[in-house]
């Protein structure tokens, strides 16, 4: 893998974040079925991905949106 590119799983995580989900549990179900990950592990990987400059280069709109959400949640604490 080129150091400048995201791995397939990382690209799939960002693609899943671009989608809208209806109803409770729909996103978690998609995480399990499509990525084969437990939701807790998914969110750990996603959080690390938000700090990865390669992810920002790959999908700046999604990464910046998720960073804003993360920062607003941190500010609420």
Image (tube, rainbow, N blue to C red):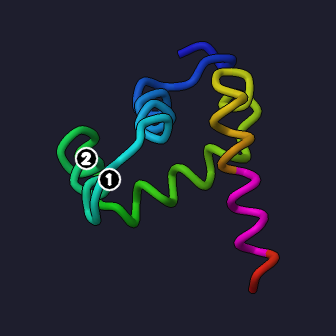
**Residue drawn 66% across the image and 31% down it:** 55
Q: What is the crowding at mark 1: few (fewer than 14 residues within 10 Å), some, or many (at least 20)?
A: some
Which quarter of the rendering shows the C terminus?
bottom right
Residue furthest toward the bottom?
77
Q: Is residue 56 magenta?
A: no
- Side of 30 where 43 appears, left or right: right
**Residue drawn 70% across the image and 62% down it:** 70
Q: What is the crowding at mark 2: few (fewer than 14 residues within 10 Å), some, or many (at least 20)?
A: some
Q: Name the mark on residue 27.
A: 1
Distance CA(mark 2)–CA(mark 1): 5 Å
Q: Residue 14 versus residue 21: which sits nearer the camera?
A: 21
Residue 11 position in % (x across, y down): 48, 27
SS class of the residue under badge 2? helix
Residue 59 position in % (x across, y down): 64, 25
- Side of 12 where 66 appears, left or right: right
Residue furthest toward the left?
33
**Residue drawn 70% across the image and 72% down it:** 73
Q: Main secondary structure of the magenta part?
A: helix
- Side of 62 where 7 appears, left or right: left
Asked if the residues shown at circle 2 and circle 1 are in contact, with their CB atoms under 8 angstroms apart, the answer is yes
Residue furthest toward the top?
2
SS class of the residue under badge 1? helix
Res 5 → quadrant: top right
Query: Which residue is tagged 2?
Result: 30
Q: Which residues are magenta?
A: 67-74
Q: Residue 22 versus residue 31: which sits nearer the camera?
A: 22
Q: Is residue 76 above or below residue 50?
A: below
Residue 20 position in % (x across, y down): 41, 42
Q: Is residue 36 above or below residue 47?
A: above
**Residue drawn 76% across the image and 81% down it:** 76
Q: Name the mark on residue 74.
A: none
């Amino acid at each position: 893998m080129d150091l400048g590119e995201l791995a397939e799983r990382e690209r799939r995580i960002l693609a899943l974040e671009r989608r809208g989900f209806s109803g409770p549990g729909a996103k978690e179900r998609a995480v399990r079925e499509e990525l084969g990950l437990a939701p807790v592990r998914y969110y750990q990987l996603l959080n690390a991905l938000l700090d990865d400059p390669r992810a920002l280069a790959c999908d700046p709109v999604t990464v910046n949106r998720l960073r804003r959400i993360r920062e607003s949640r941190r500010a609420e604490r």
